[in-house]
């Protein structure tokens, strides 16, 4: 039995100026203010991650409930639980009366979740990676920026960046 309202589905990512989230593995830049923002935003929340992203973040989950998106039914995460679909993750999140499910990557999880997403929290990094793992493209017509905080390059940040929160302009009923 479902309880409560459908949780908000948010994608959070740092994306290079040419649309990539990684050069292959891990985060390709060290931006302390962005990392601080990521940790603050995701604190205490249910997270949806792809298998590789989950493995890369092991040891990081302290007050989170990770859901690992994997087609491998035999995969049992050390922390959290496996889900086969974004909808299954949303259903579990709703049953637990959580208000939000945050997708943290990688590219496959972002691509699977974007059609259902309500919000994007994107750190636009002023750096070209030239290739790697892409963030799925999204139409600026479907998303409205509602908050923006910009940071300049400095002694601890090799690149300038802006953290932008987008809300979906028109979202179709998931049940339809």
Image (spheres, rainbow, N blue to C red):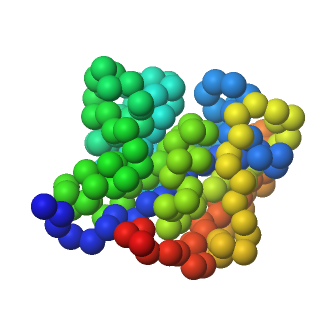
Q: Residue furthest top?
A: 74
Q: Position of residue 130 (x, y in %)?
A: 86, 35
Quadrant of the snapshot with the N terminus: bottom left
Q: Residue at (34%, 48%) from the top-left corner?
A: 89
Q: Residue at (28%, 34%) from the top-left corner?
A: 81
Q: Residue at (41%, 30%) from the top-left corner?
A: 71
Q: Residue at (29%, 42%) from the top-left corner?
A: 65
Q: Position of residue 20 (x, y in %)?
A: 74, 41
Q: Is residue 41 visible?
A: yes
Which sits in the foreground, 28 or 80?
80
**For residue 81, side relative to residue 34 (left or right):** left
Which sits in the foreground, 8 or 29?
8
**For residue 156, side relative to residue 130 (left or right):** left
**For residue 159, side relative to residue 54 (left or right):** right
Q: Say which quarter of the image contains residue 163.
A: bottom right
Quadrant of the snapshot with the C terminus: bottom left
Q: Position of residue 80 (x, y in %)?
A: 28, 34
Which sits in the foreground, 28 or 48?
48
Q: Is residue 43 visible?
A: no
Q: Say which quarter of the image contains residue 169.
A: bottom right
């Amino acid at each position: 039995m479902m309880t409560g309202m459908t949780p908000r589905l948010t994608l959070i990512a740092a994306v290079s100026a040419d649309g990539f989230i990684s050069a292959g593995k891990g985060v390709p830049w060290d931006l302390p203010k962005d990392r601080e923002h990521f940790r603050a935003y995701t604190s205490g929340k249910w997270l949806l991650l792809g298998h590789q992203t989950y493995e890369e973040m092991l040891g990081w989950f302290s007050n989170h409930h990770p859901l690992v998106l994997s087609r491998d039914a035999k995969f049992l995460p050390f922390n959290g639980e496996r889900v086969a679909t974004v909808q299954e993750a949303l259903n579990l999140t709703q049953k637990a009366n959580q208000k939000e499910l945050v997708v943290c990557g990688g590219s496959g999880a972002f691509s699977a979740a974007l059609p259902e997403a309500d919000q994007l929290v994107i750190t636009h990094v002023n750096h070209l990676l030239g290739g790697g793992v892409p963030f799925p493209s999204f139409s600026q017509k479907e998303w409205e920026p509602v908050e923006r905080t910009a940071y300049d390059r400095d002694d601890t940040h090799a690149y300038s960046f802006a953290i932008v929160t987008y809300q979906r302009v028109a979202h179709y009923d998931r049940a339809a």
